[in-house]
Amino acid sequence: MNEKEKSSSSILRTLGKIALIVAIVIVYAYGLQVTKVDLEKPQEGKRQQQLTNILRGLANPDLFEWKIDRVVAEAPVLIPCDGQTLAAPAPVEGQPTITLSTYCAEPGETITVSGFGWARNEDVFLFFIPYTADKDNEVALKLLDDRVVTDNQGNFTVEAELKNDRLSDKPATIRAVANRKTGMPGPSEALKQTWEKIIETVFLALIATTFGIFLAVPFSFLAARNLMIDVNSTFVKFMASLAVVPIGGYLGYIIFKSLTDLGRSFTGGGEASASALLWSVLPVLGFAVLKGSADGGSKLFATLRRVIISAVITVVVVLALAALANVGRGTGTDLKIETGLTGVIGNFILILSDAILLGMPVLGFVIGFFLISSMAGSVTEMVEDRASEGVVRIVAIVLAAIAGMLWFGVITAVLNWLYQFGDLRYVIIAPAVIGAVLLTGIAIASNPHRIIPTGMFIYYIVRTIMNIFRSIEPLVMVVAFAVWVGIGPFAGVMALGLHTIVALGKLYSEQVENIAVGPIEAVTATGANRLQMIIYAVMPQIVPPYIAFTLYRWDINVRMSTIIGFGGGGGIGFLLSQNINLLKYRQASVNMIAIAIVVASLDYLSAKVREKIT
Amino acid sequence: MLEIKNLSKIYDNTVLALDDVSFEVPQGQFLAVVGLSGSGKSTLLRCINRLIEPTGGQIIWDGVDVTAALPEDLRRIRRRIGMIFQHFNLVQRSPVMTNVLSGRLGYTNPFWSLINRFPKDDVAMALRQLERVGLEEKAYTRADELSGGQQQRVGIARALMQEPAIMLADEPVASLDPVLAHSIMQYLEKLKEENITVICSLHFLDLVQRYADRAVALKDGKVVFDGHPSEIDDKRFEEIYGEEAQRIG
């Protein structure tokens, strides 16, 4: 490189730097413009006054209040003066008094008011009360705009101008009033409200976190790469699962729903109970027969027997739970109206019963979904093992056609519910046909024994859903929930709970991904099945970090629940937003102090506990 | 009789870990697998119980094709094949007892094992196995409180809970000091009395020559030696480990 080239490249570099600086200046200039930064506004007198009001309010939290004793002294005055002379009021021992320079004055005259026997440096307010026969409806007008402060002896002298109006031939009254704080200070109204709402806030966070954990744990397994990566199946097996799971889920839902209804009718009273009881004898009878039948026999018979026994046990458990929940609903509703602990327990029973009744069909869906999927898996495995290549191919194509039809149909049904294209009976046909054709095509083109990474499919779907929901702040979610279930802490619980599921699911799954693989390998090598492997090799490794992250999340939830009220989610945030909107800054200050105390102490507490367990 | 026929494993379509490996192991033999790190020893052992799926070839055990077994059958095969590991692979936070009992998972009713219930017989058996490895007093200690040698003995007890016919040992003493190494090898040697086949990958030739009935050497995934350990002379050693290798120990 010669000298010339060198210098030209250094000029270029300098030019580049200048361009960069210009670009940065432009970016910031534009940024300031967009964000409407205005350094003159904060200097305006009016705005500074507003700021002062807010800061003074916040600096004087309305924490305590005294009982106020009102001390009053009066003196009569006649306006206009008609020659009568009113007597000065007689002083009472130990009570403050006021005297006037004259008790008979002309309108507009300036008189002198003197006070004796007040407390030292006390604020006294002077009022003018026109004559009225009805003492209850008297009108107190301000005699002076300002308060009067007594001197060191508890006396004061002040001049006041009498108004021109309110003339009467009856004496009016000049009244001096002092408000004295008496006794010990007690909690203010604002403090009481804050206490009530902060308790609500902490429980809101607790309930939301608890709800979140239940769903976050299973999701975290589905979103853990190391657990899902070796969940594979052949193409034909995958198609079989795809084709049957919607049916299995639906059947499970229907069966559990009917069983729940049947179980409820046990305790419904009257004819329904009688017929239901009759029906319930059948499974018990069948169970007895099976239990009595001899052990042994063929392998198929043993399997069949085991399947039937499990089915009967499931049916009986569902029936019993539904019956119990129905009783619980009645009892809960009755107890709920009681006061105190009984009412709280009653409400708890009611909620638990409702949860069982609502949860049963959902559980049925899940069981049906997985049961039929594993059954289809076993059957196709057998077919793959025994049938000829051609048969496997045909099976794969048929299953793919069914799977395509069903899934495109289901997705269309969901979209139709959202977008209301038209009558579902008609709009579903085209997508179902397209789905069937599409998957048939894929099935024809691919090897039925090809390995499909089903685990990774599930992994990506769960991850995507979690990422989408995690990016929506609970403060935004709560708006939707407040519309659904009304403004209040329940909406807050739902919003925070949903966010907790996805956020904890992500954190948990990262913990699963970090576990040592050795124990998994070792437990798998003993011939344990997948679920046993998870219980014995995965669980012991993840329980401590799960607890730590749960506490951490509770901590976050407490912080979030303090503001979720701004979106309609109840808790202290609701009170705070009200106080701010009503310009009650002293009360708002109390709310903020409470938030700070609760957040800081839970922060400390959860850090301590996390330290202990890890 | 365990037959390994033309076994091969290719990782990610590129790395050839096992290349057409074939040999037979009669029941009750103590077989040492030797070779450099990366020669395919671990892959070979893990293909036998299909912790790693082989890409080609067959493993036939007493006439049953292990490589073709369906998941349920594979679990039944696996429970007769014990395995111990270089890093012991215990669940560190669980008590020794739970670790040992987990060797029984292939036999227990899945439902009961989910809530950590094992049959009385299994618990008694676990205590016997712990006694056998001299750790009965540590039954309720957490695994991470044990020393390396003790952890490996728990690993052996766990594998023995499976009542195995084959014991796979993947570098069982590579993380232990020489004194402990011999004590662990002696436990494995004793398995011969119960006619358990031991397939053990080892680094140190003196251990191979002292304990093994037979040695199979792998190099770049190929079998380069198959015979009695005493036949490994300096020339063979160079073939297995490369010319630059120095014989130690």
Image: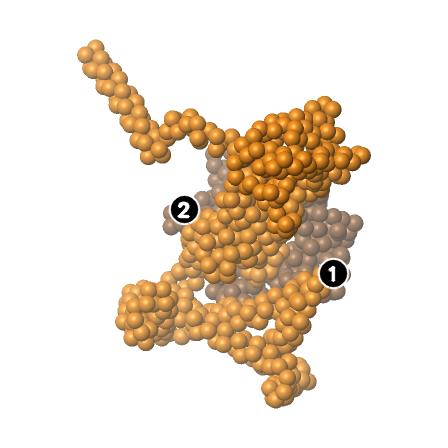
Residue type marked 2: Val
Residue type marked 1: Val
Which residue is tagged 1?
B123
Dividing the image into 4 quarters, which one contains the C terminus of chain A? top right
Which one is in front, A34 or A395? A34
Q: What label does residue B15 carry, if any?
A: 2
Q: Residue furthest left?
A: A4
Which one is in front, B12 or A215? A215
Residue A518 as seen in the image, left or right of residue A375: right
Which one is in front, A539 or A412? A412
Discs 1, 2 touching: Cβ within 8 Å? no
Q: Is residue B180 above or below residue A51?
A: below
Q: Residue furthest right?
A: A93
Residue B35 as seen in the image, left or right of residue B178: left
Chain in orange, by letter, is A
Identified at 60% across, 60% down, the residue is A532
Q: Position of residue A596 (x, y in %)?
A: 60, 39
Which element type, helix, strand or loop, lies under badge 1? Answer: helix
Chain at numbered mark 1? B
Dividing the image into 4 quarters, which one contains the N terminus of chain A? top left
Residue A377 as seen in the image, left or right of residue A281: left
Q: Is residue A178 above or below residue B79?
A: above
Per the rendering, the colour in which chain B appears is: brown
Asked where in the image residue A83 lies, by quadrant, the reply is top right
